Image (spheres, rainbow, N blue to C red):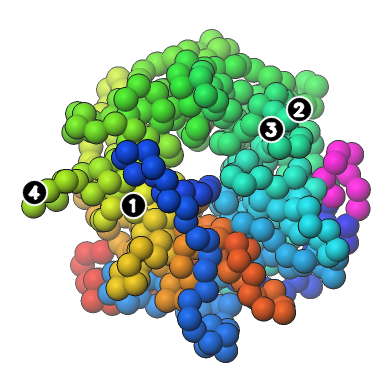
Amino acid sequence: MSCQPTPCSPVLCTIPFGASQLFTQSLPVKTSRSGTCRPRPRGRLRGRSVSAVLAASLAIPATSFGQDQVESARILPAYTSEEAGAYRFGETVALTSIESTPYLLVSAAGVTFVGNDIKQASAHQFARIDGGWAEGVKLLGLGEARTSPFMAVAADGSEMILAYDSGPPQSGQGRVLTMPATTAPEIIIDDIIGTPVSASVRPGVVAVGLPTQGVGTVLIYRYESQISGWLADSVLGNADDFGRSVVLDKTGTRLVVGAPKAGINGQVETYIFVQNSWVHYSTVQPPSSFATQTDARFGTSVDIVDNWLAVGGPKADHHFGVGGPPPEDAGYVLLYEYGTFDYVFSQSIRGATEGDAFGTSVALATKKNGGYRLAVGAPGDDVSASNGDTEEGAAYSYSLNPGATSWSRDYRLVSSRSAEYEYSNLGVAVDTDGDLVVAGAPYTPVDLGGGFRNEVGVVLAWDLGALFSDGFETGSLNAWSSSSP
């Protein structure tokens, strides 16, 4: 691996893909409806022997246990002799494809250096080569680590964007830059005032969300070929926590922005690009069923593909029809389809139990069969239910196949090591390209040599797009037939 200074503060490190080994946001407290908080322990290793934990390989066959599917790969960065390891690796993730090769961009809240307790945030890039994940470019020194997520990553084709808090904590200094897929230096798009927490990129267009206590903003940049550089295009803002989530459609002319603290339960704003300016188009409100509660955080996560919009409300409650108080913070994902004039509600999907935070993250993509895949993060999911409030976390996969009229669940995507790790919070971040699903588990303990360290973090990947000879996807053999998926 080689490292060299770049024109800005980060250090650019490159690992040749051919020589690399293969490797396979933060919810600090759980808040009750009364507002009281109980701290969560993080990334705790359960009472199992180290040898039993290490027995699992980093490359694990994609095996389906009923409706649970364990990962096909565990992704970790490589570390030099000067680097003691990562801190909360996997807080944000983004998948893209360059010349048919999947690329993955991952942020870490910090990398600890030997002899230095200061954690410097980092971004890591991986390529999927010969079925494994090889680390390529990584950027170090992206500002002092925070106790909560402060970096947004986004990718589309060869465009990879980082938006992060570049100054000391609480300084309000931010930076937006491109991250190359090669050894070329990154390009600073802008130095900004504010803390970016969300980003979206399409060819030639970047949107960055800076939510605040008050009216948040979304900054939009466009690439101008005449000057071979990026220019600030627009500044949008109209609601509390506006910009907590942002997504551009594939044309870069429609923008969806989440404002989960706006109003009683949150809302989503849509914009269109008309005559060289962004125009507010509509407001998407949470369903009327949310009226029985407050603070559902509708708009915490958003994503769009073609005519479909997914919105997460991870603090939404719901009734199971059995009486008694509703499970708090189970979470919902609401699906909307674009009609003649606007998005029209189509379907809701709810979390299973109290505290699942289902909908903390969402991702949409097109599948090989022409249908769609939805990935949802539920970082509070108690996978090992018999152990009580364990919150290992999970991701969920849903499909809308050609000819189907509703979305159906494929799998709950879990860690093969859920039995060992409590409070890993798998699903804080998710992404999918329609075939692959990736999810961050930033609080997972990892043995980097010398014993396990808490809150190192991993990213798990599931390959749901490999095909049987009959053209259907892999998975539970009992769930497939020769005539229907």
What residue is shown at x 8% (from left), y 49% (from top)? 323
Q: Specify the quadrant that holds the C terminus.
A: bottom left
The quadrant holding residue 291 is: top left
Pointer 4 residue: 323
Which tag is nearer the camera, tag 2 or tag 3?
3
**Mark 3 nearby-residue class (10 Å; few <14, some 14–19, many ≥20):** few
Query: Which type of secondary structure does the marked residue at label 2 adopt?
Result: strand
Instruction: Say which residue appears at 66% left-offset and 58% top-offset.
Output: 87
Q: Which of 41 and 378 is in front in this view?
A: 41
Check residue 177 in the rendering and tell me which mark sits there, or answer none.
Answer: none
At label 2, which amino acid type do we have? Asp
Residue stretch rendered in magenta on the structure: 4-11
Residue 64 can be seen, yes or no? yes
**What residue is pinned by disc 2?**
191
Of labels 1 and 2, earlier in sequence is: 2
Disc 4 vs disc 3: Cβ atoms closer than 8 Å?
no
Q: What element carries label 1?
A: loop
325 is within the stretch colored magenta: no
Q: Which amino acid does label 3 sit on?
A: Gln
Q: Decide which of 74, 249 is in the foreground and name it.
A: 74
Closer to the observer: label 1 or label 2?
1
Q: Please name the amino acid that badge 4 sits on.
A: Gly
Residue at the location (89% across, 39% down)? Answer: 7
Q: How far apart are marks 1 and 2 (CA)?
A: 37 Å
Task: Say whether disc 4 or disc 2 marks the residue closer to the N-terminus.
Answer: 2
Mark pair 4, 3: CA separation: 45 Å
Residue indicated by mark 3 = 170
Please tell me how crowded label 4 is: few (under 14), some (14-19), or many (20+) other residues with Cα within 10 Å.
Answer: few
Res. 307 in view: no
Pointers 4 and 2 in contact (CB under 8 A)?
Answer: no
